[in-house]
Amino acid sequence: MRKSLIFIIFALVFLTPFILQADIYTTMQEIVNTMEGYVIFLEDSLNQEIVHFQADIIVEDGKSFSRTFHEGWTYGITAFADWRVTDLDITIYKDVDGQWVEIESDDAVDNHPTITVVPSSTGIYLIELEVYSFAEDYTVAHYGMLIYHELH
């Protein structure tokens, strides 16, 4: 009985970390680590202020959301995806009389697009992330995105 109990305790102590290890398909560790690298680089090397960051799941339909950008600031938007995405794109639209007009885009074939937006006026802008191409047969992945501007 005592040997069985010692074996069970041994198994729990030494095998639990392997059992609880994150699955590569569900973990956000890669995205969080990449985001940390961007934050350090942007703040420490480029003297930028992070004004928004997010991490989420992205599917074939992409993601879109609106944000106010202010005249007089230069904004950078960087997005990145995990290994399941081979081509991620960003497009920025400005609300002009109730219509979304494209003002900037990054459609390079990569999974880490970056664009710069210099608003001509303060207003609502639409940020659209589109997965142009997934790796293999994937239809879902993790992504991260940061919005930043220079310090004044």
Image: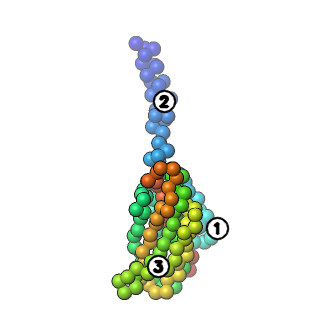
Q: Quadrant of the C terminus?
A: bottom right
The residue shown at (46%, 87%) is: 121
Residue found farthest to the top? 1
Distance Cα–Cα, label 1 vs label 3: 30 Å
Q: Quadrant of the N terminus?
A: top left
- Looking at the rendered structure, the kind of residue marked 2 is Leu
Distance Cα–Cα, label 2 vs label 3: 53 Å
- Looking at the rendered structure, the kind of residue marked 1 is Ser
Front residue of 3 and 74: 74
Image position of 62 with respect to 92: above or below: above
> Which residue position holds label 1?
45
Distance Cα–Cα, label 2 vs label 1: 41 Å
> Which residue position holds label 3?
102
> Which residue position holds label 2?
15
Marks 2 and 1, the one that precedes in the sequence: 2
Q: Nearer the viewer, mark 2 or mark 3?
A: 3
Image position of 126 with respect to 79: above or below: below
Q: Secondary structure at mark 2?
A: helix
The residue shown at (54%, 61%) is: 87
Q: Secondary structure at mark 3?
A: strand
- Looking at the rendered structure, the kind of residue marked 3 is Glu
Q: Secondary structure at mark 1?
A: helix
Res 24 seen here:
yes
Quadrant housing residue 56: bottom left
Label 1 environment density (alpha carbons within 10 Å; few <14, some 14–19, many ≥20): few
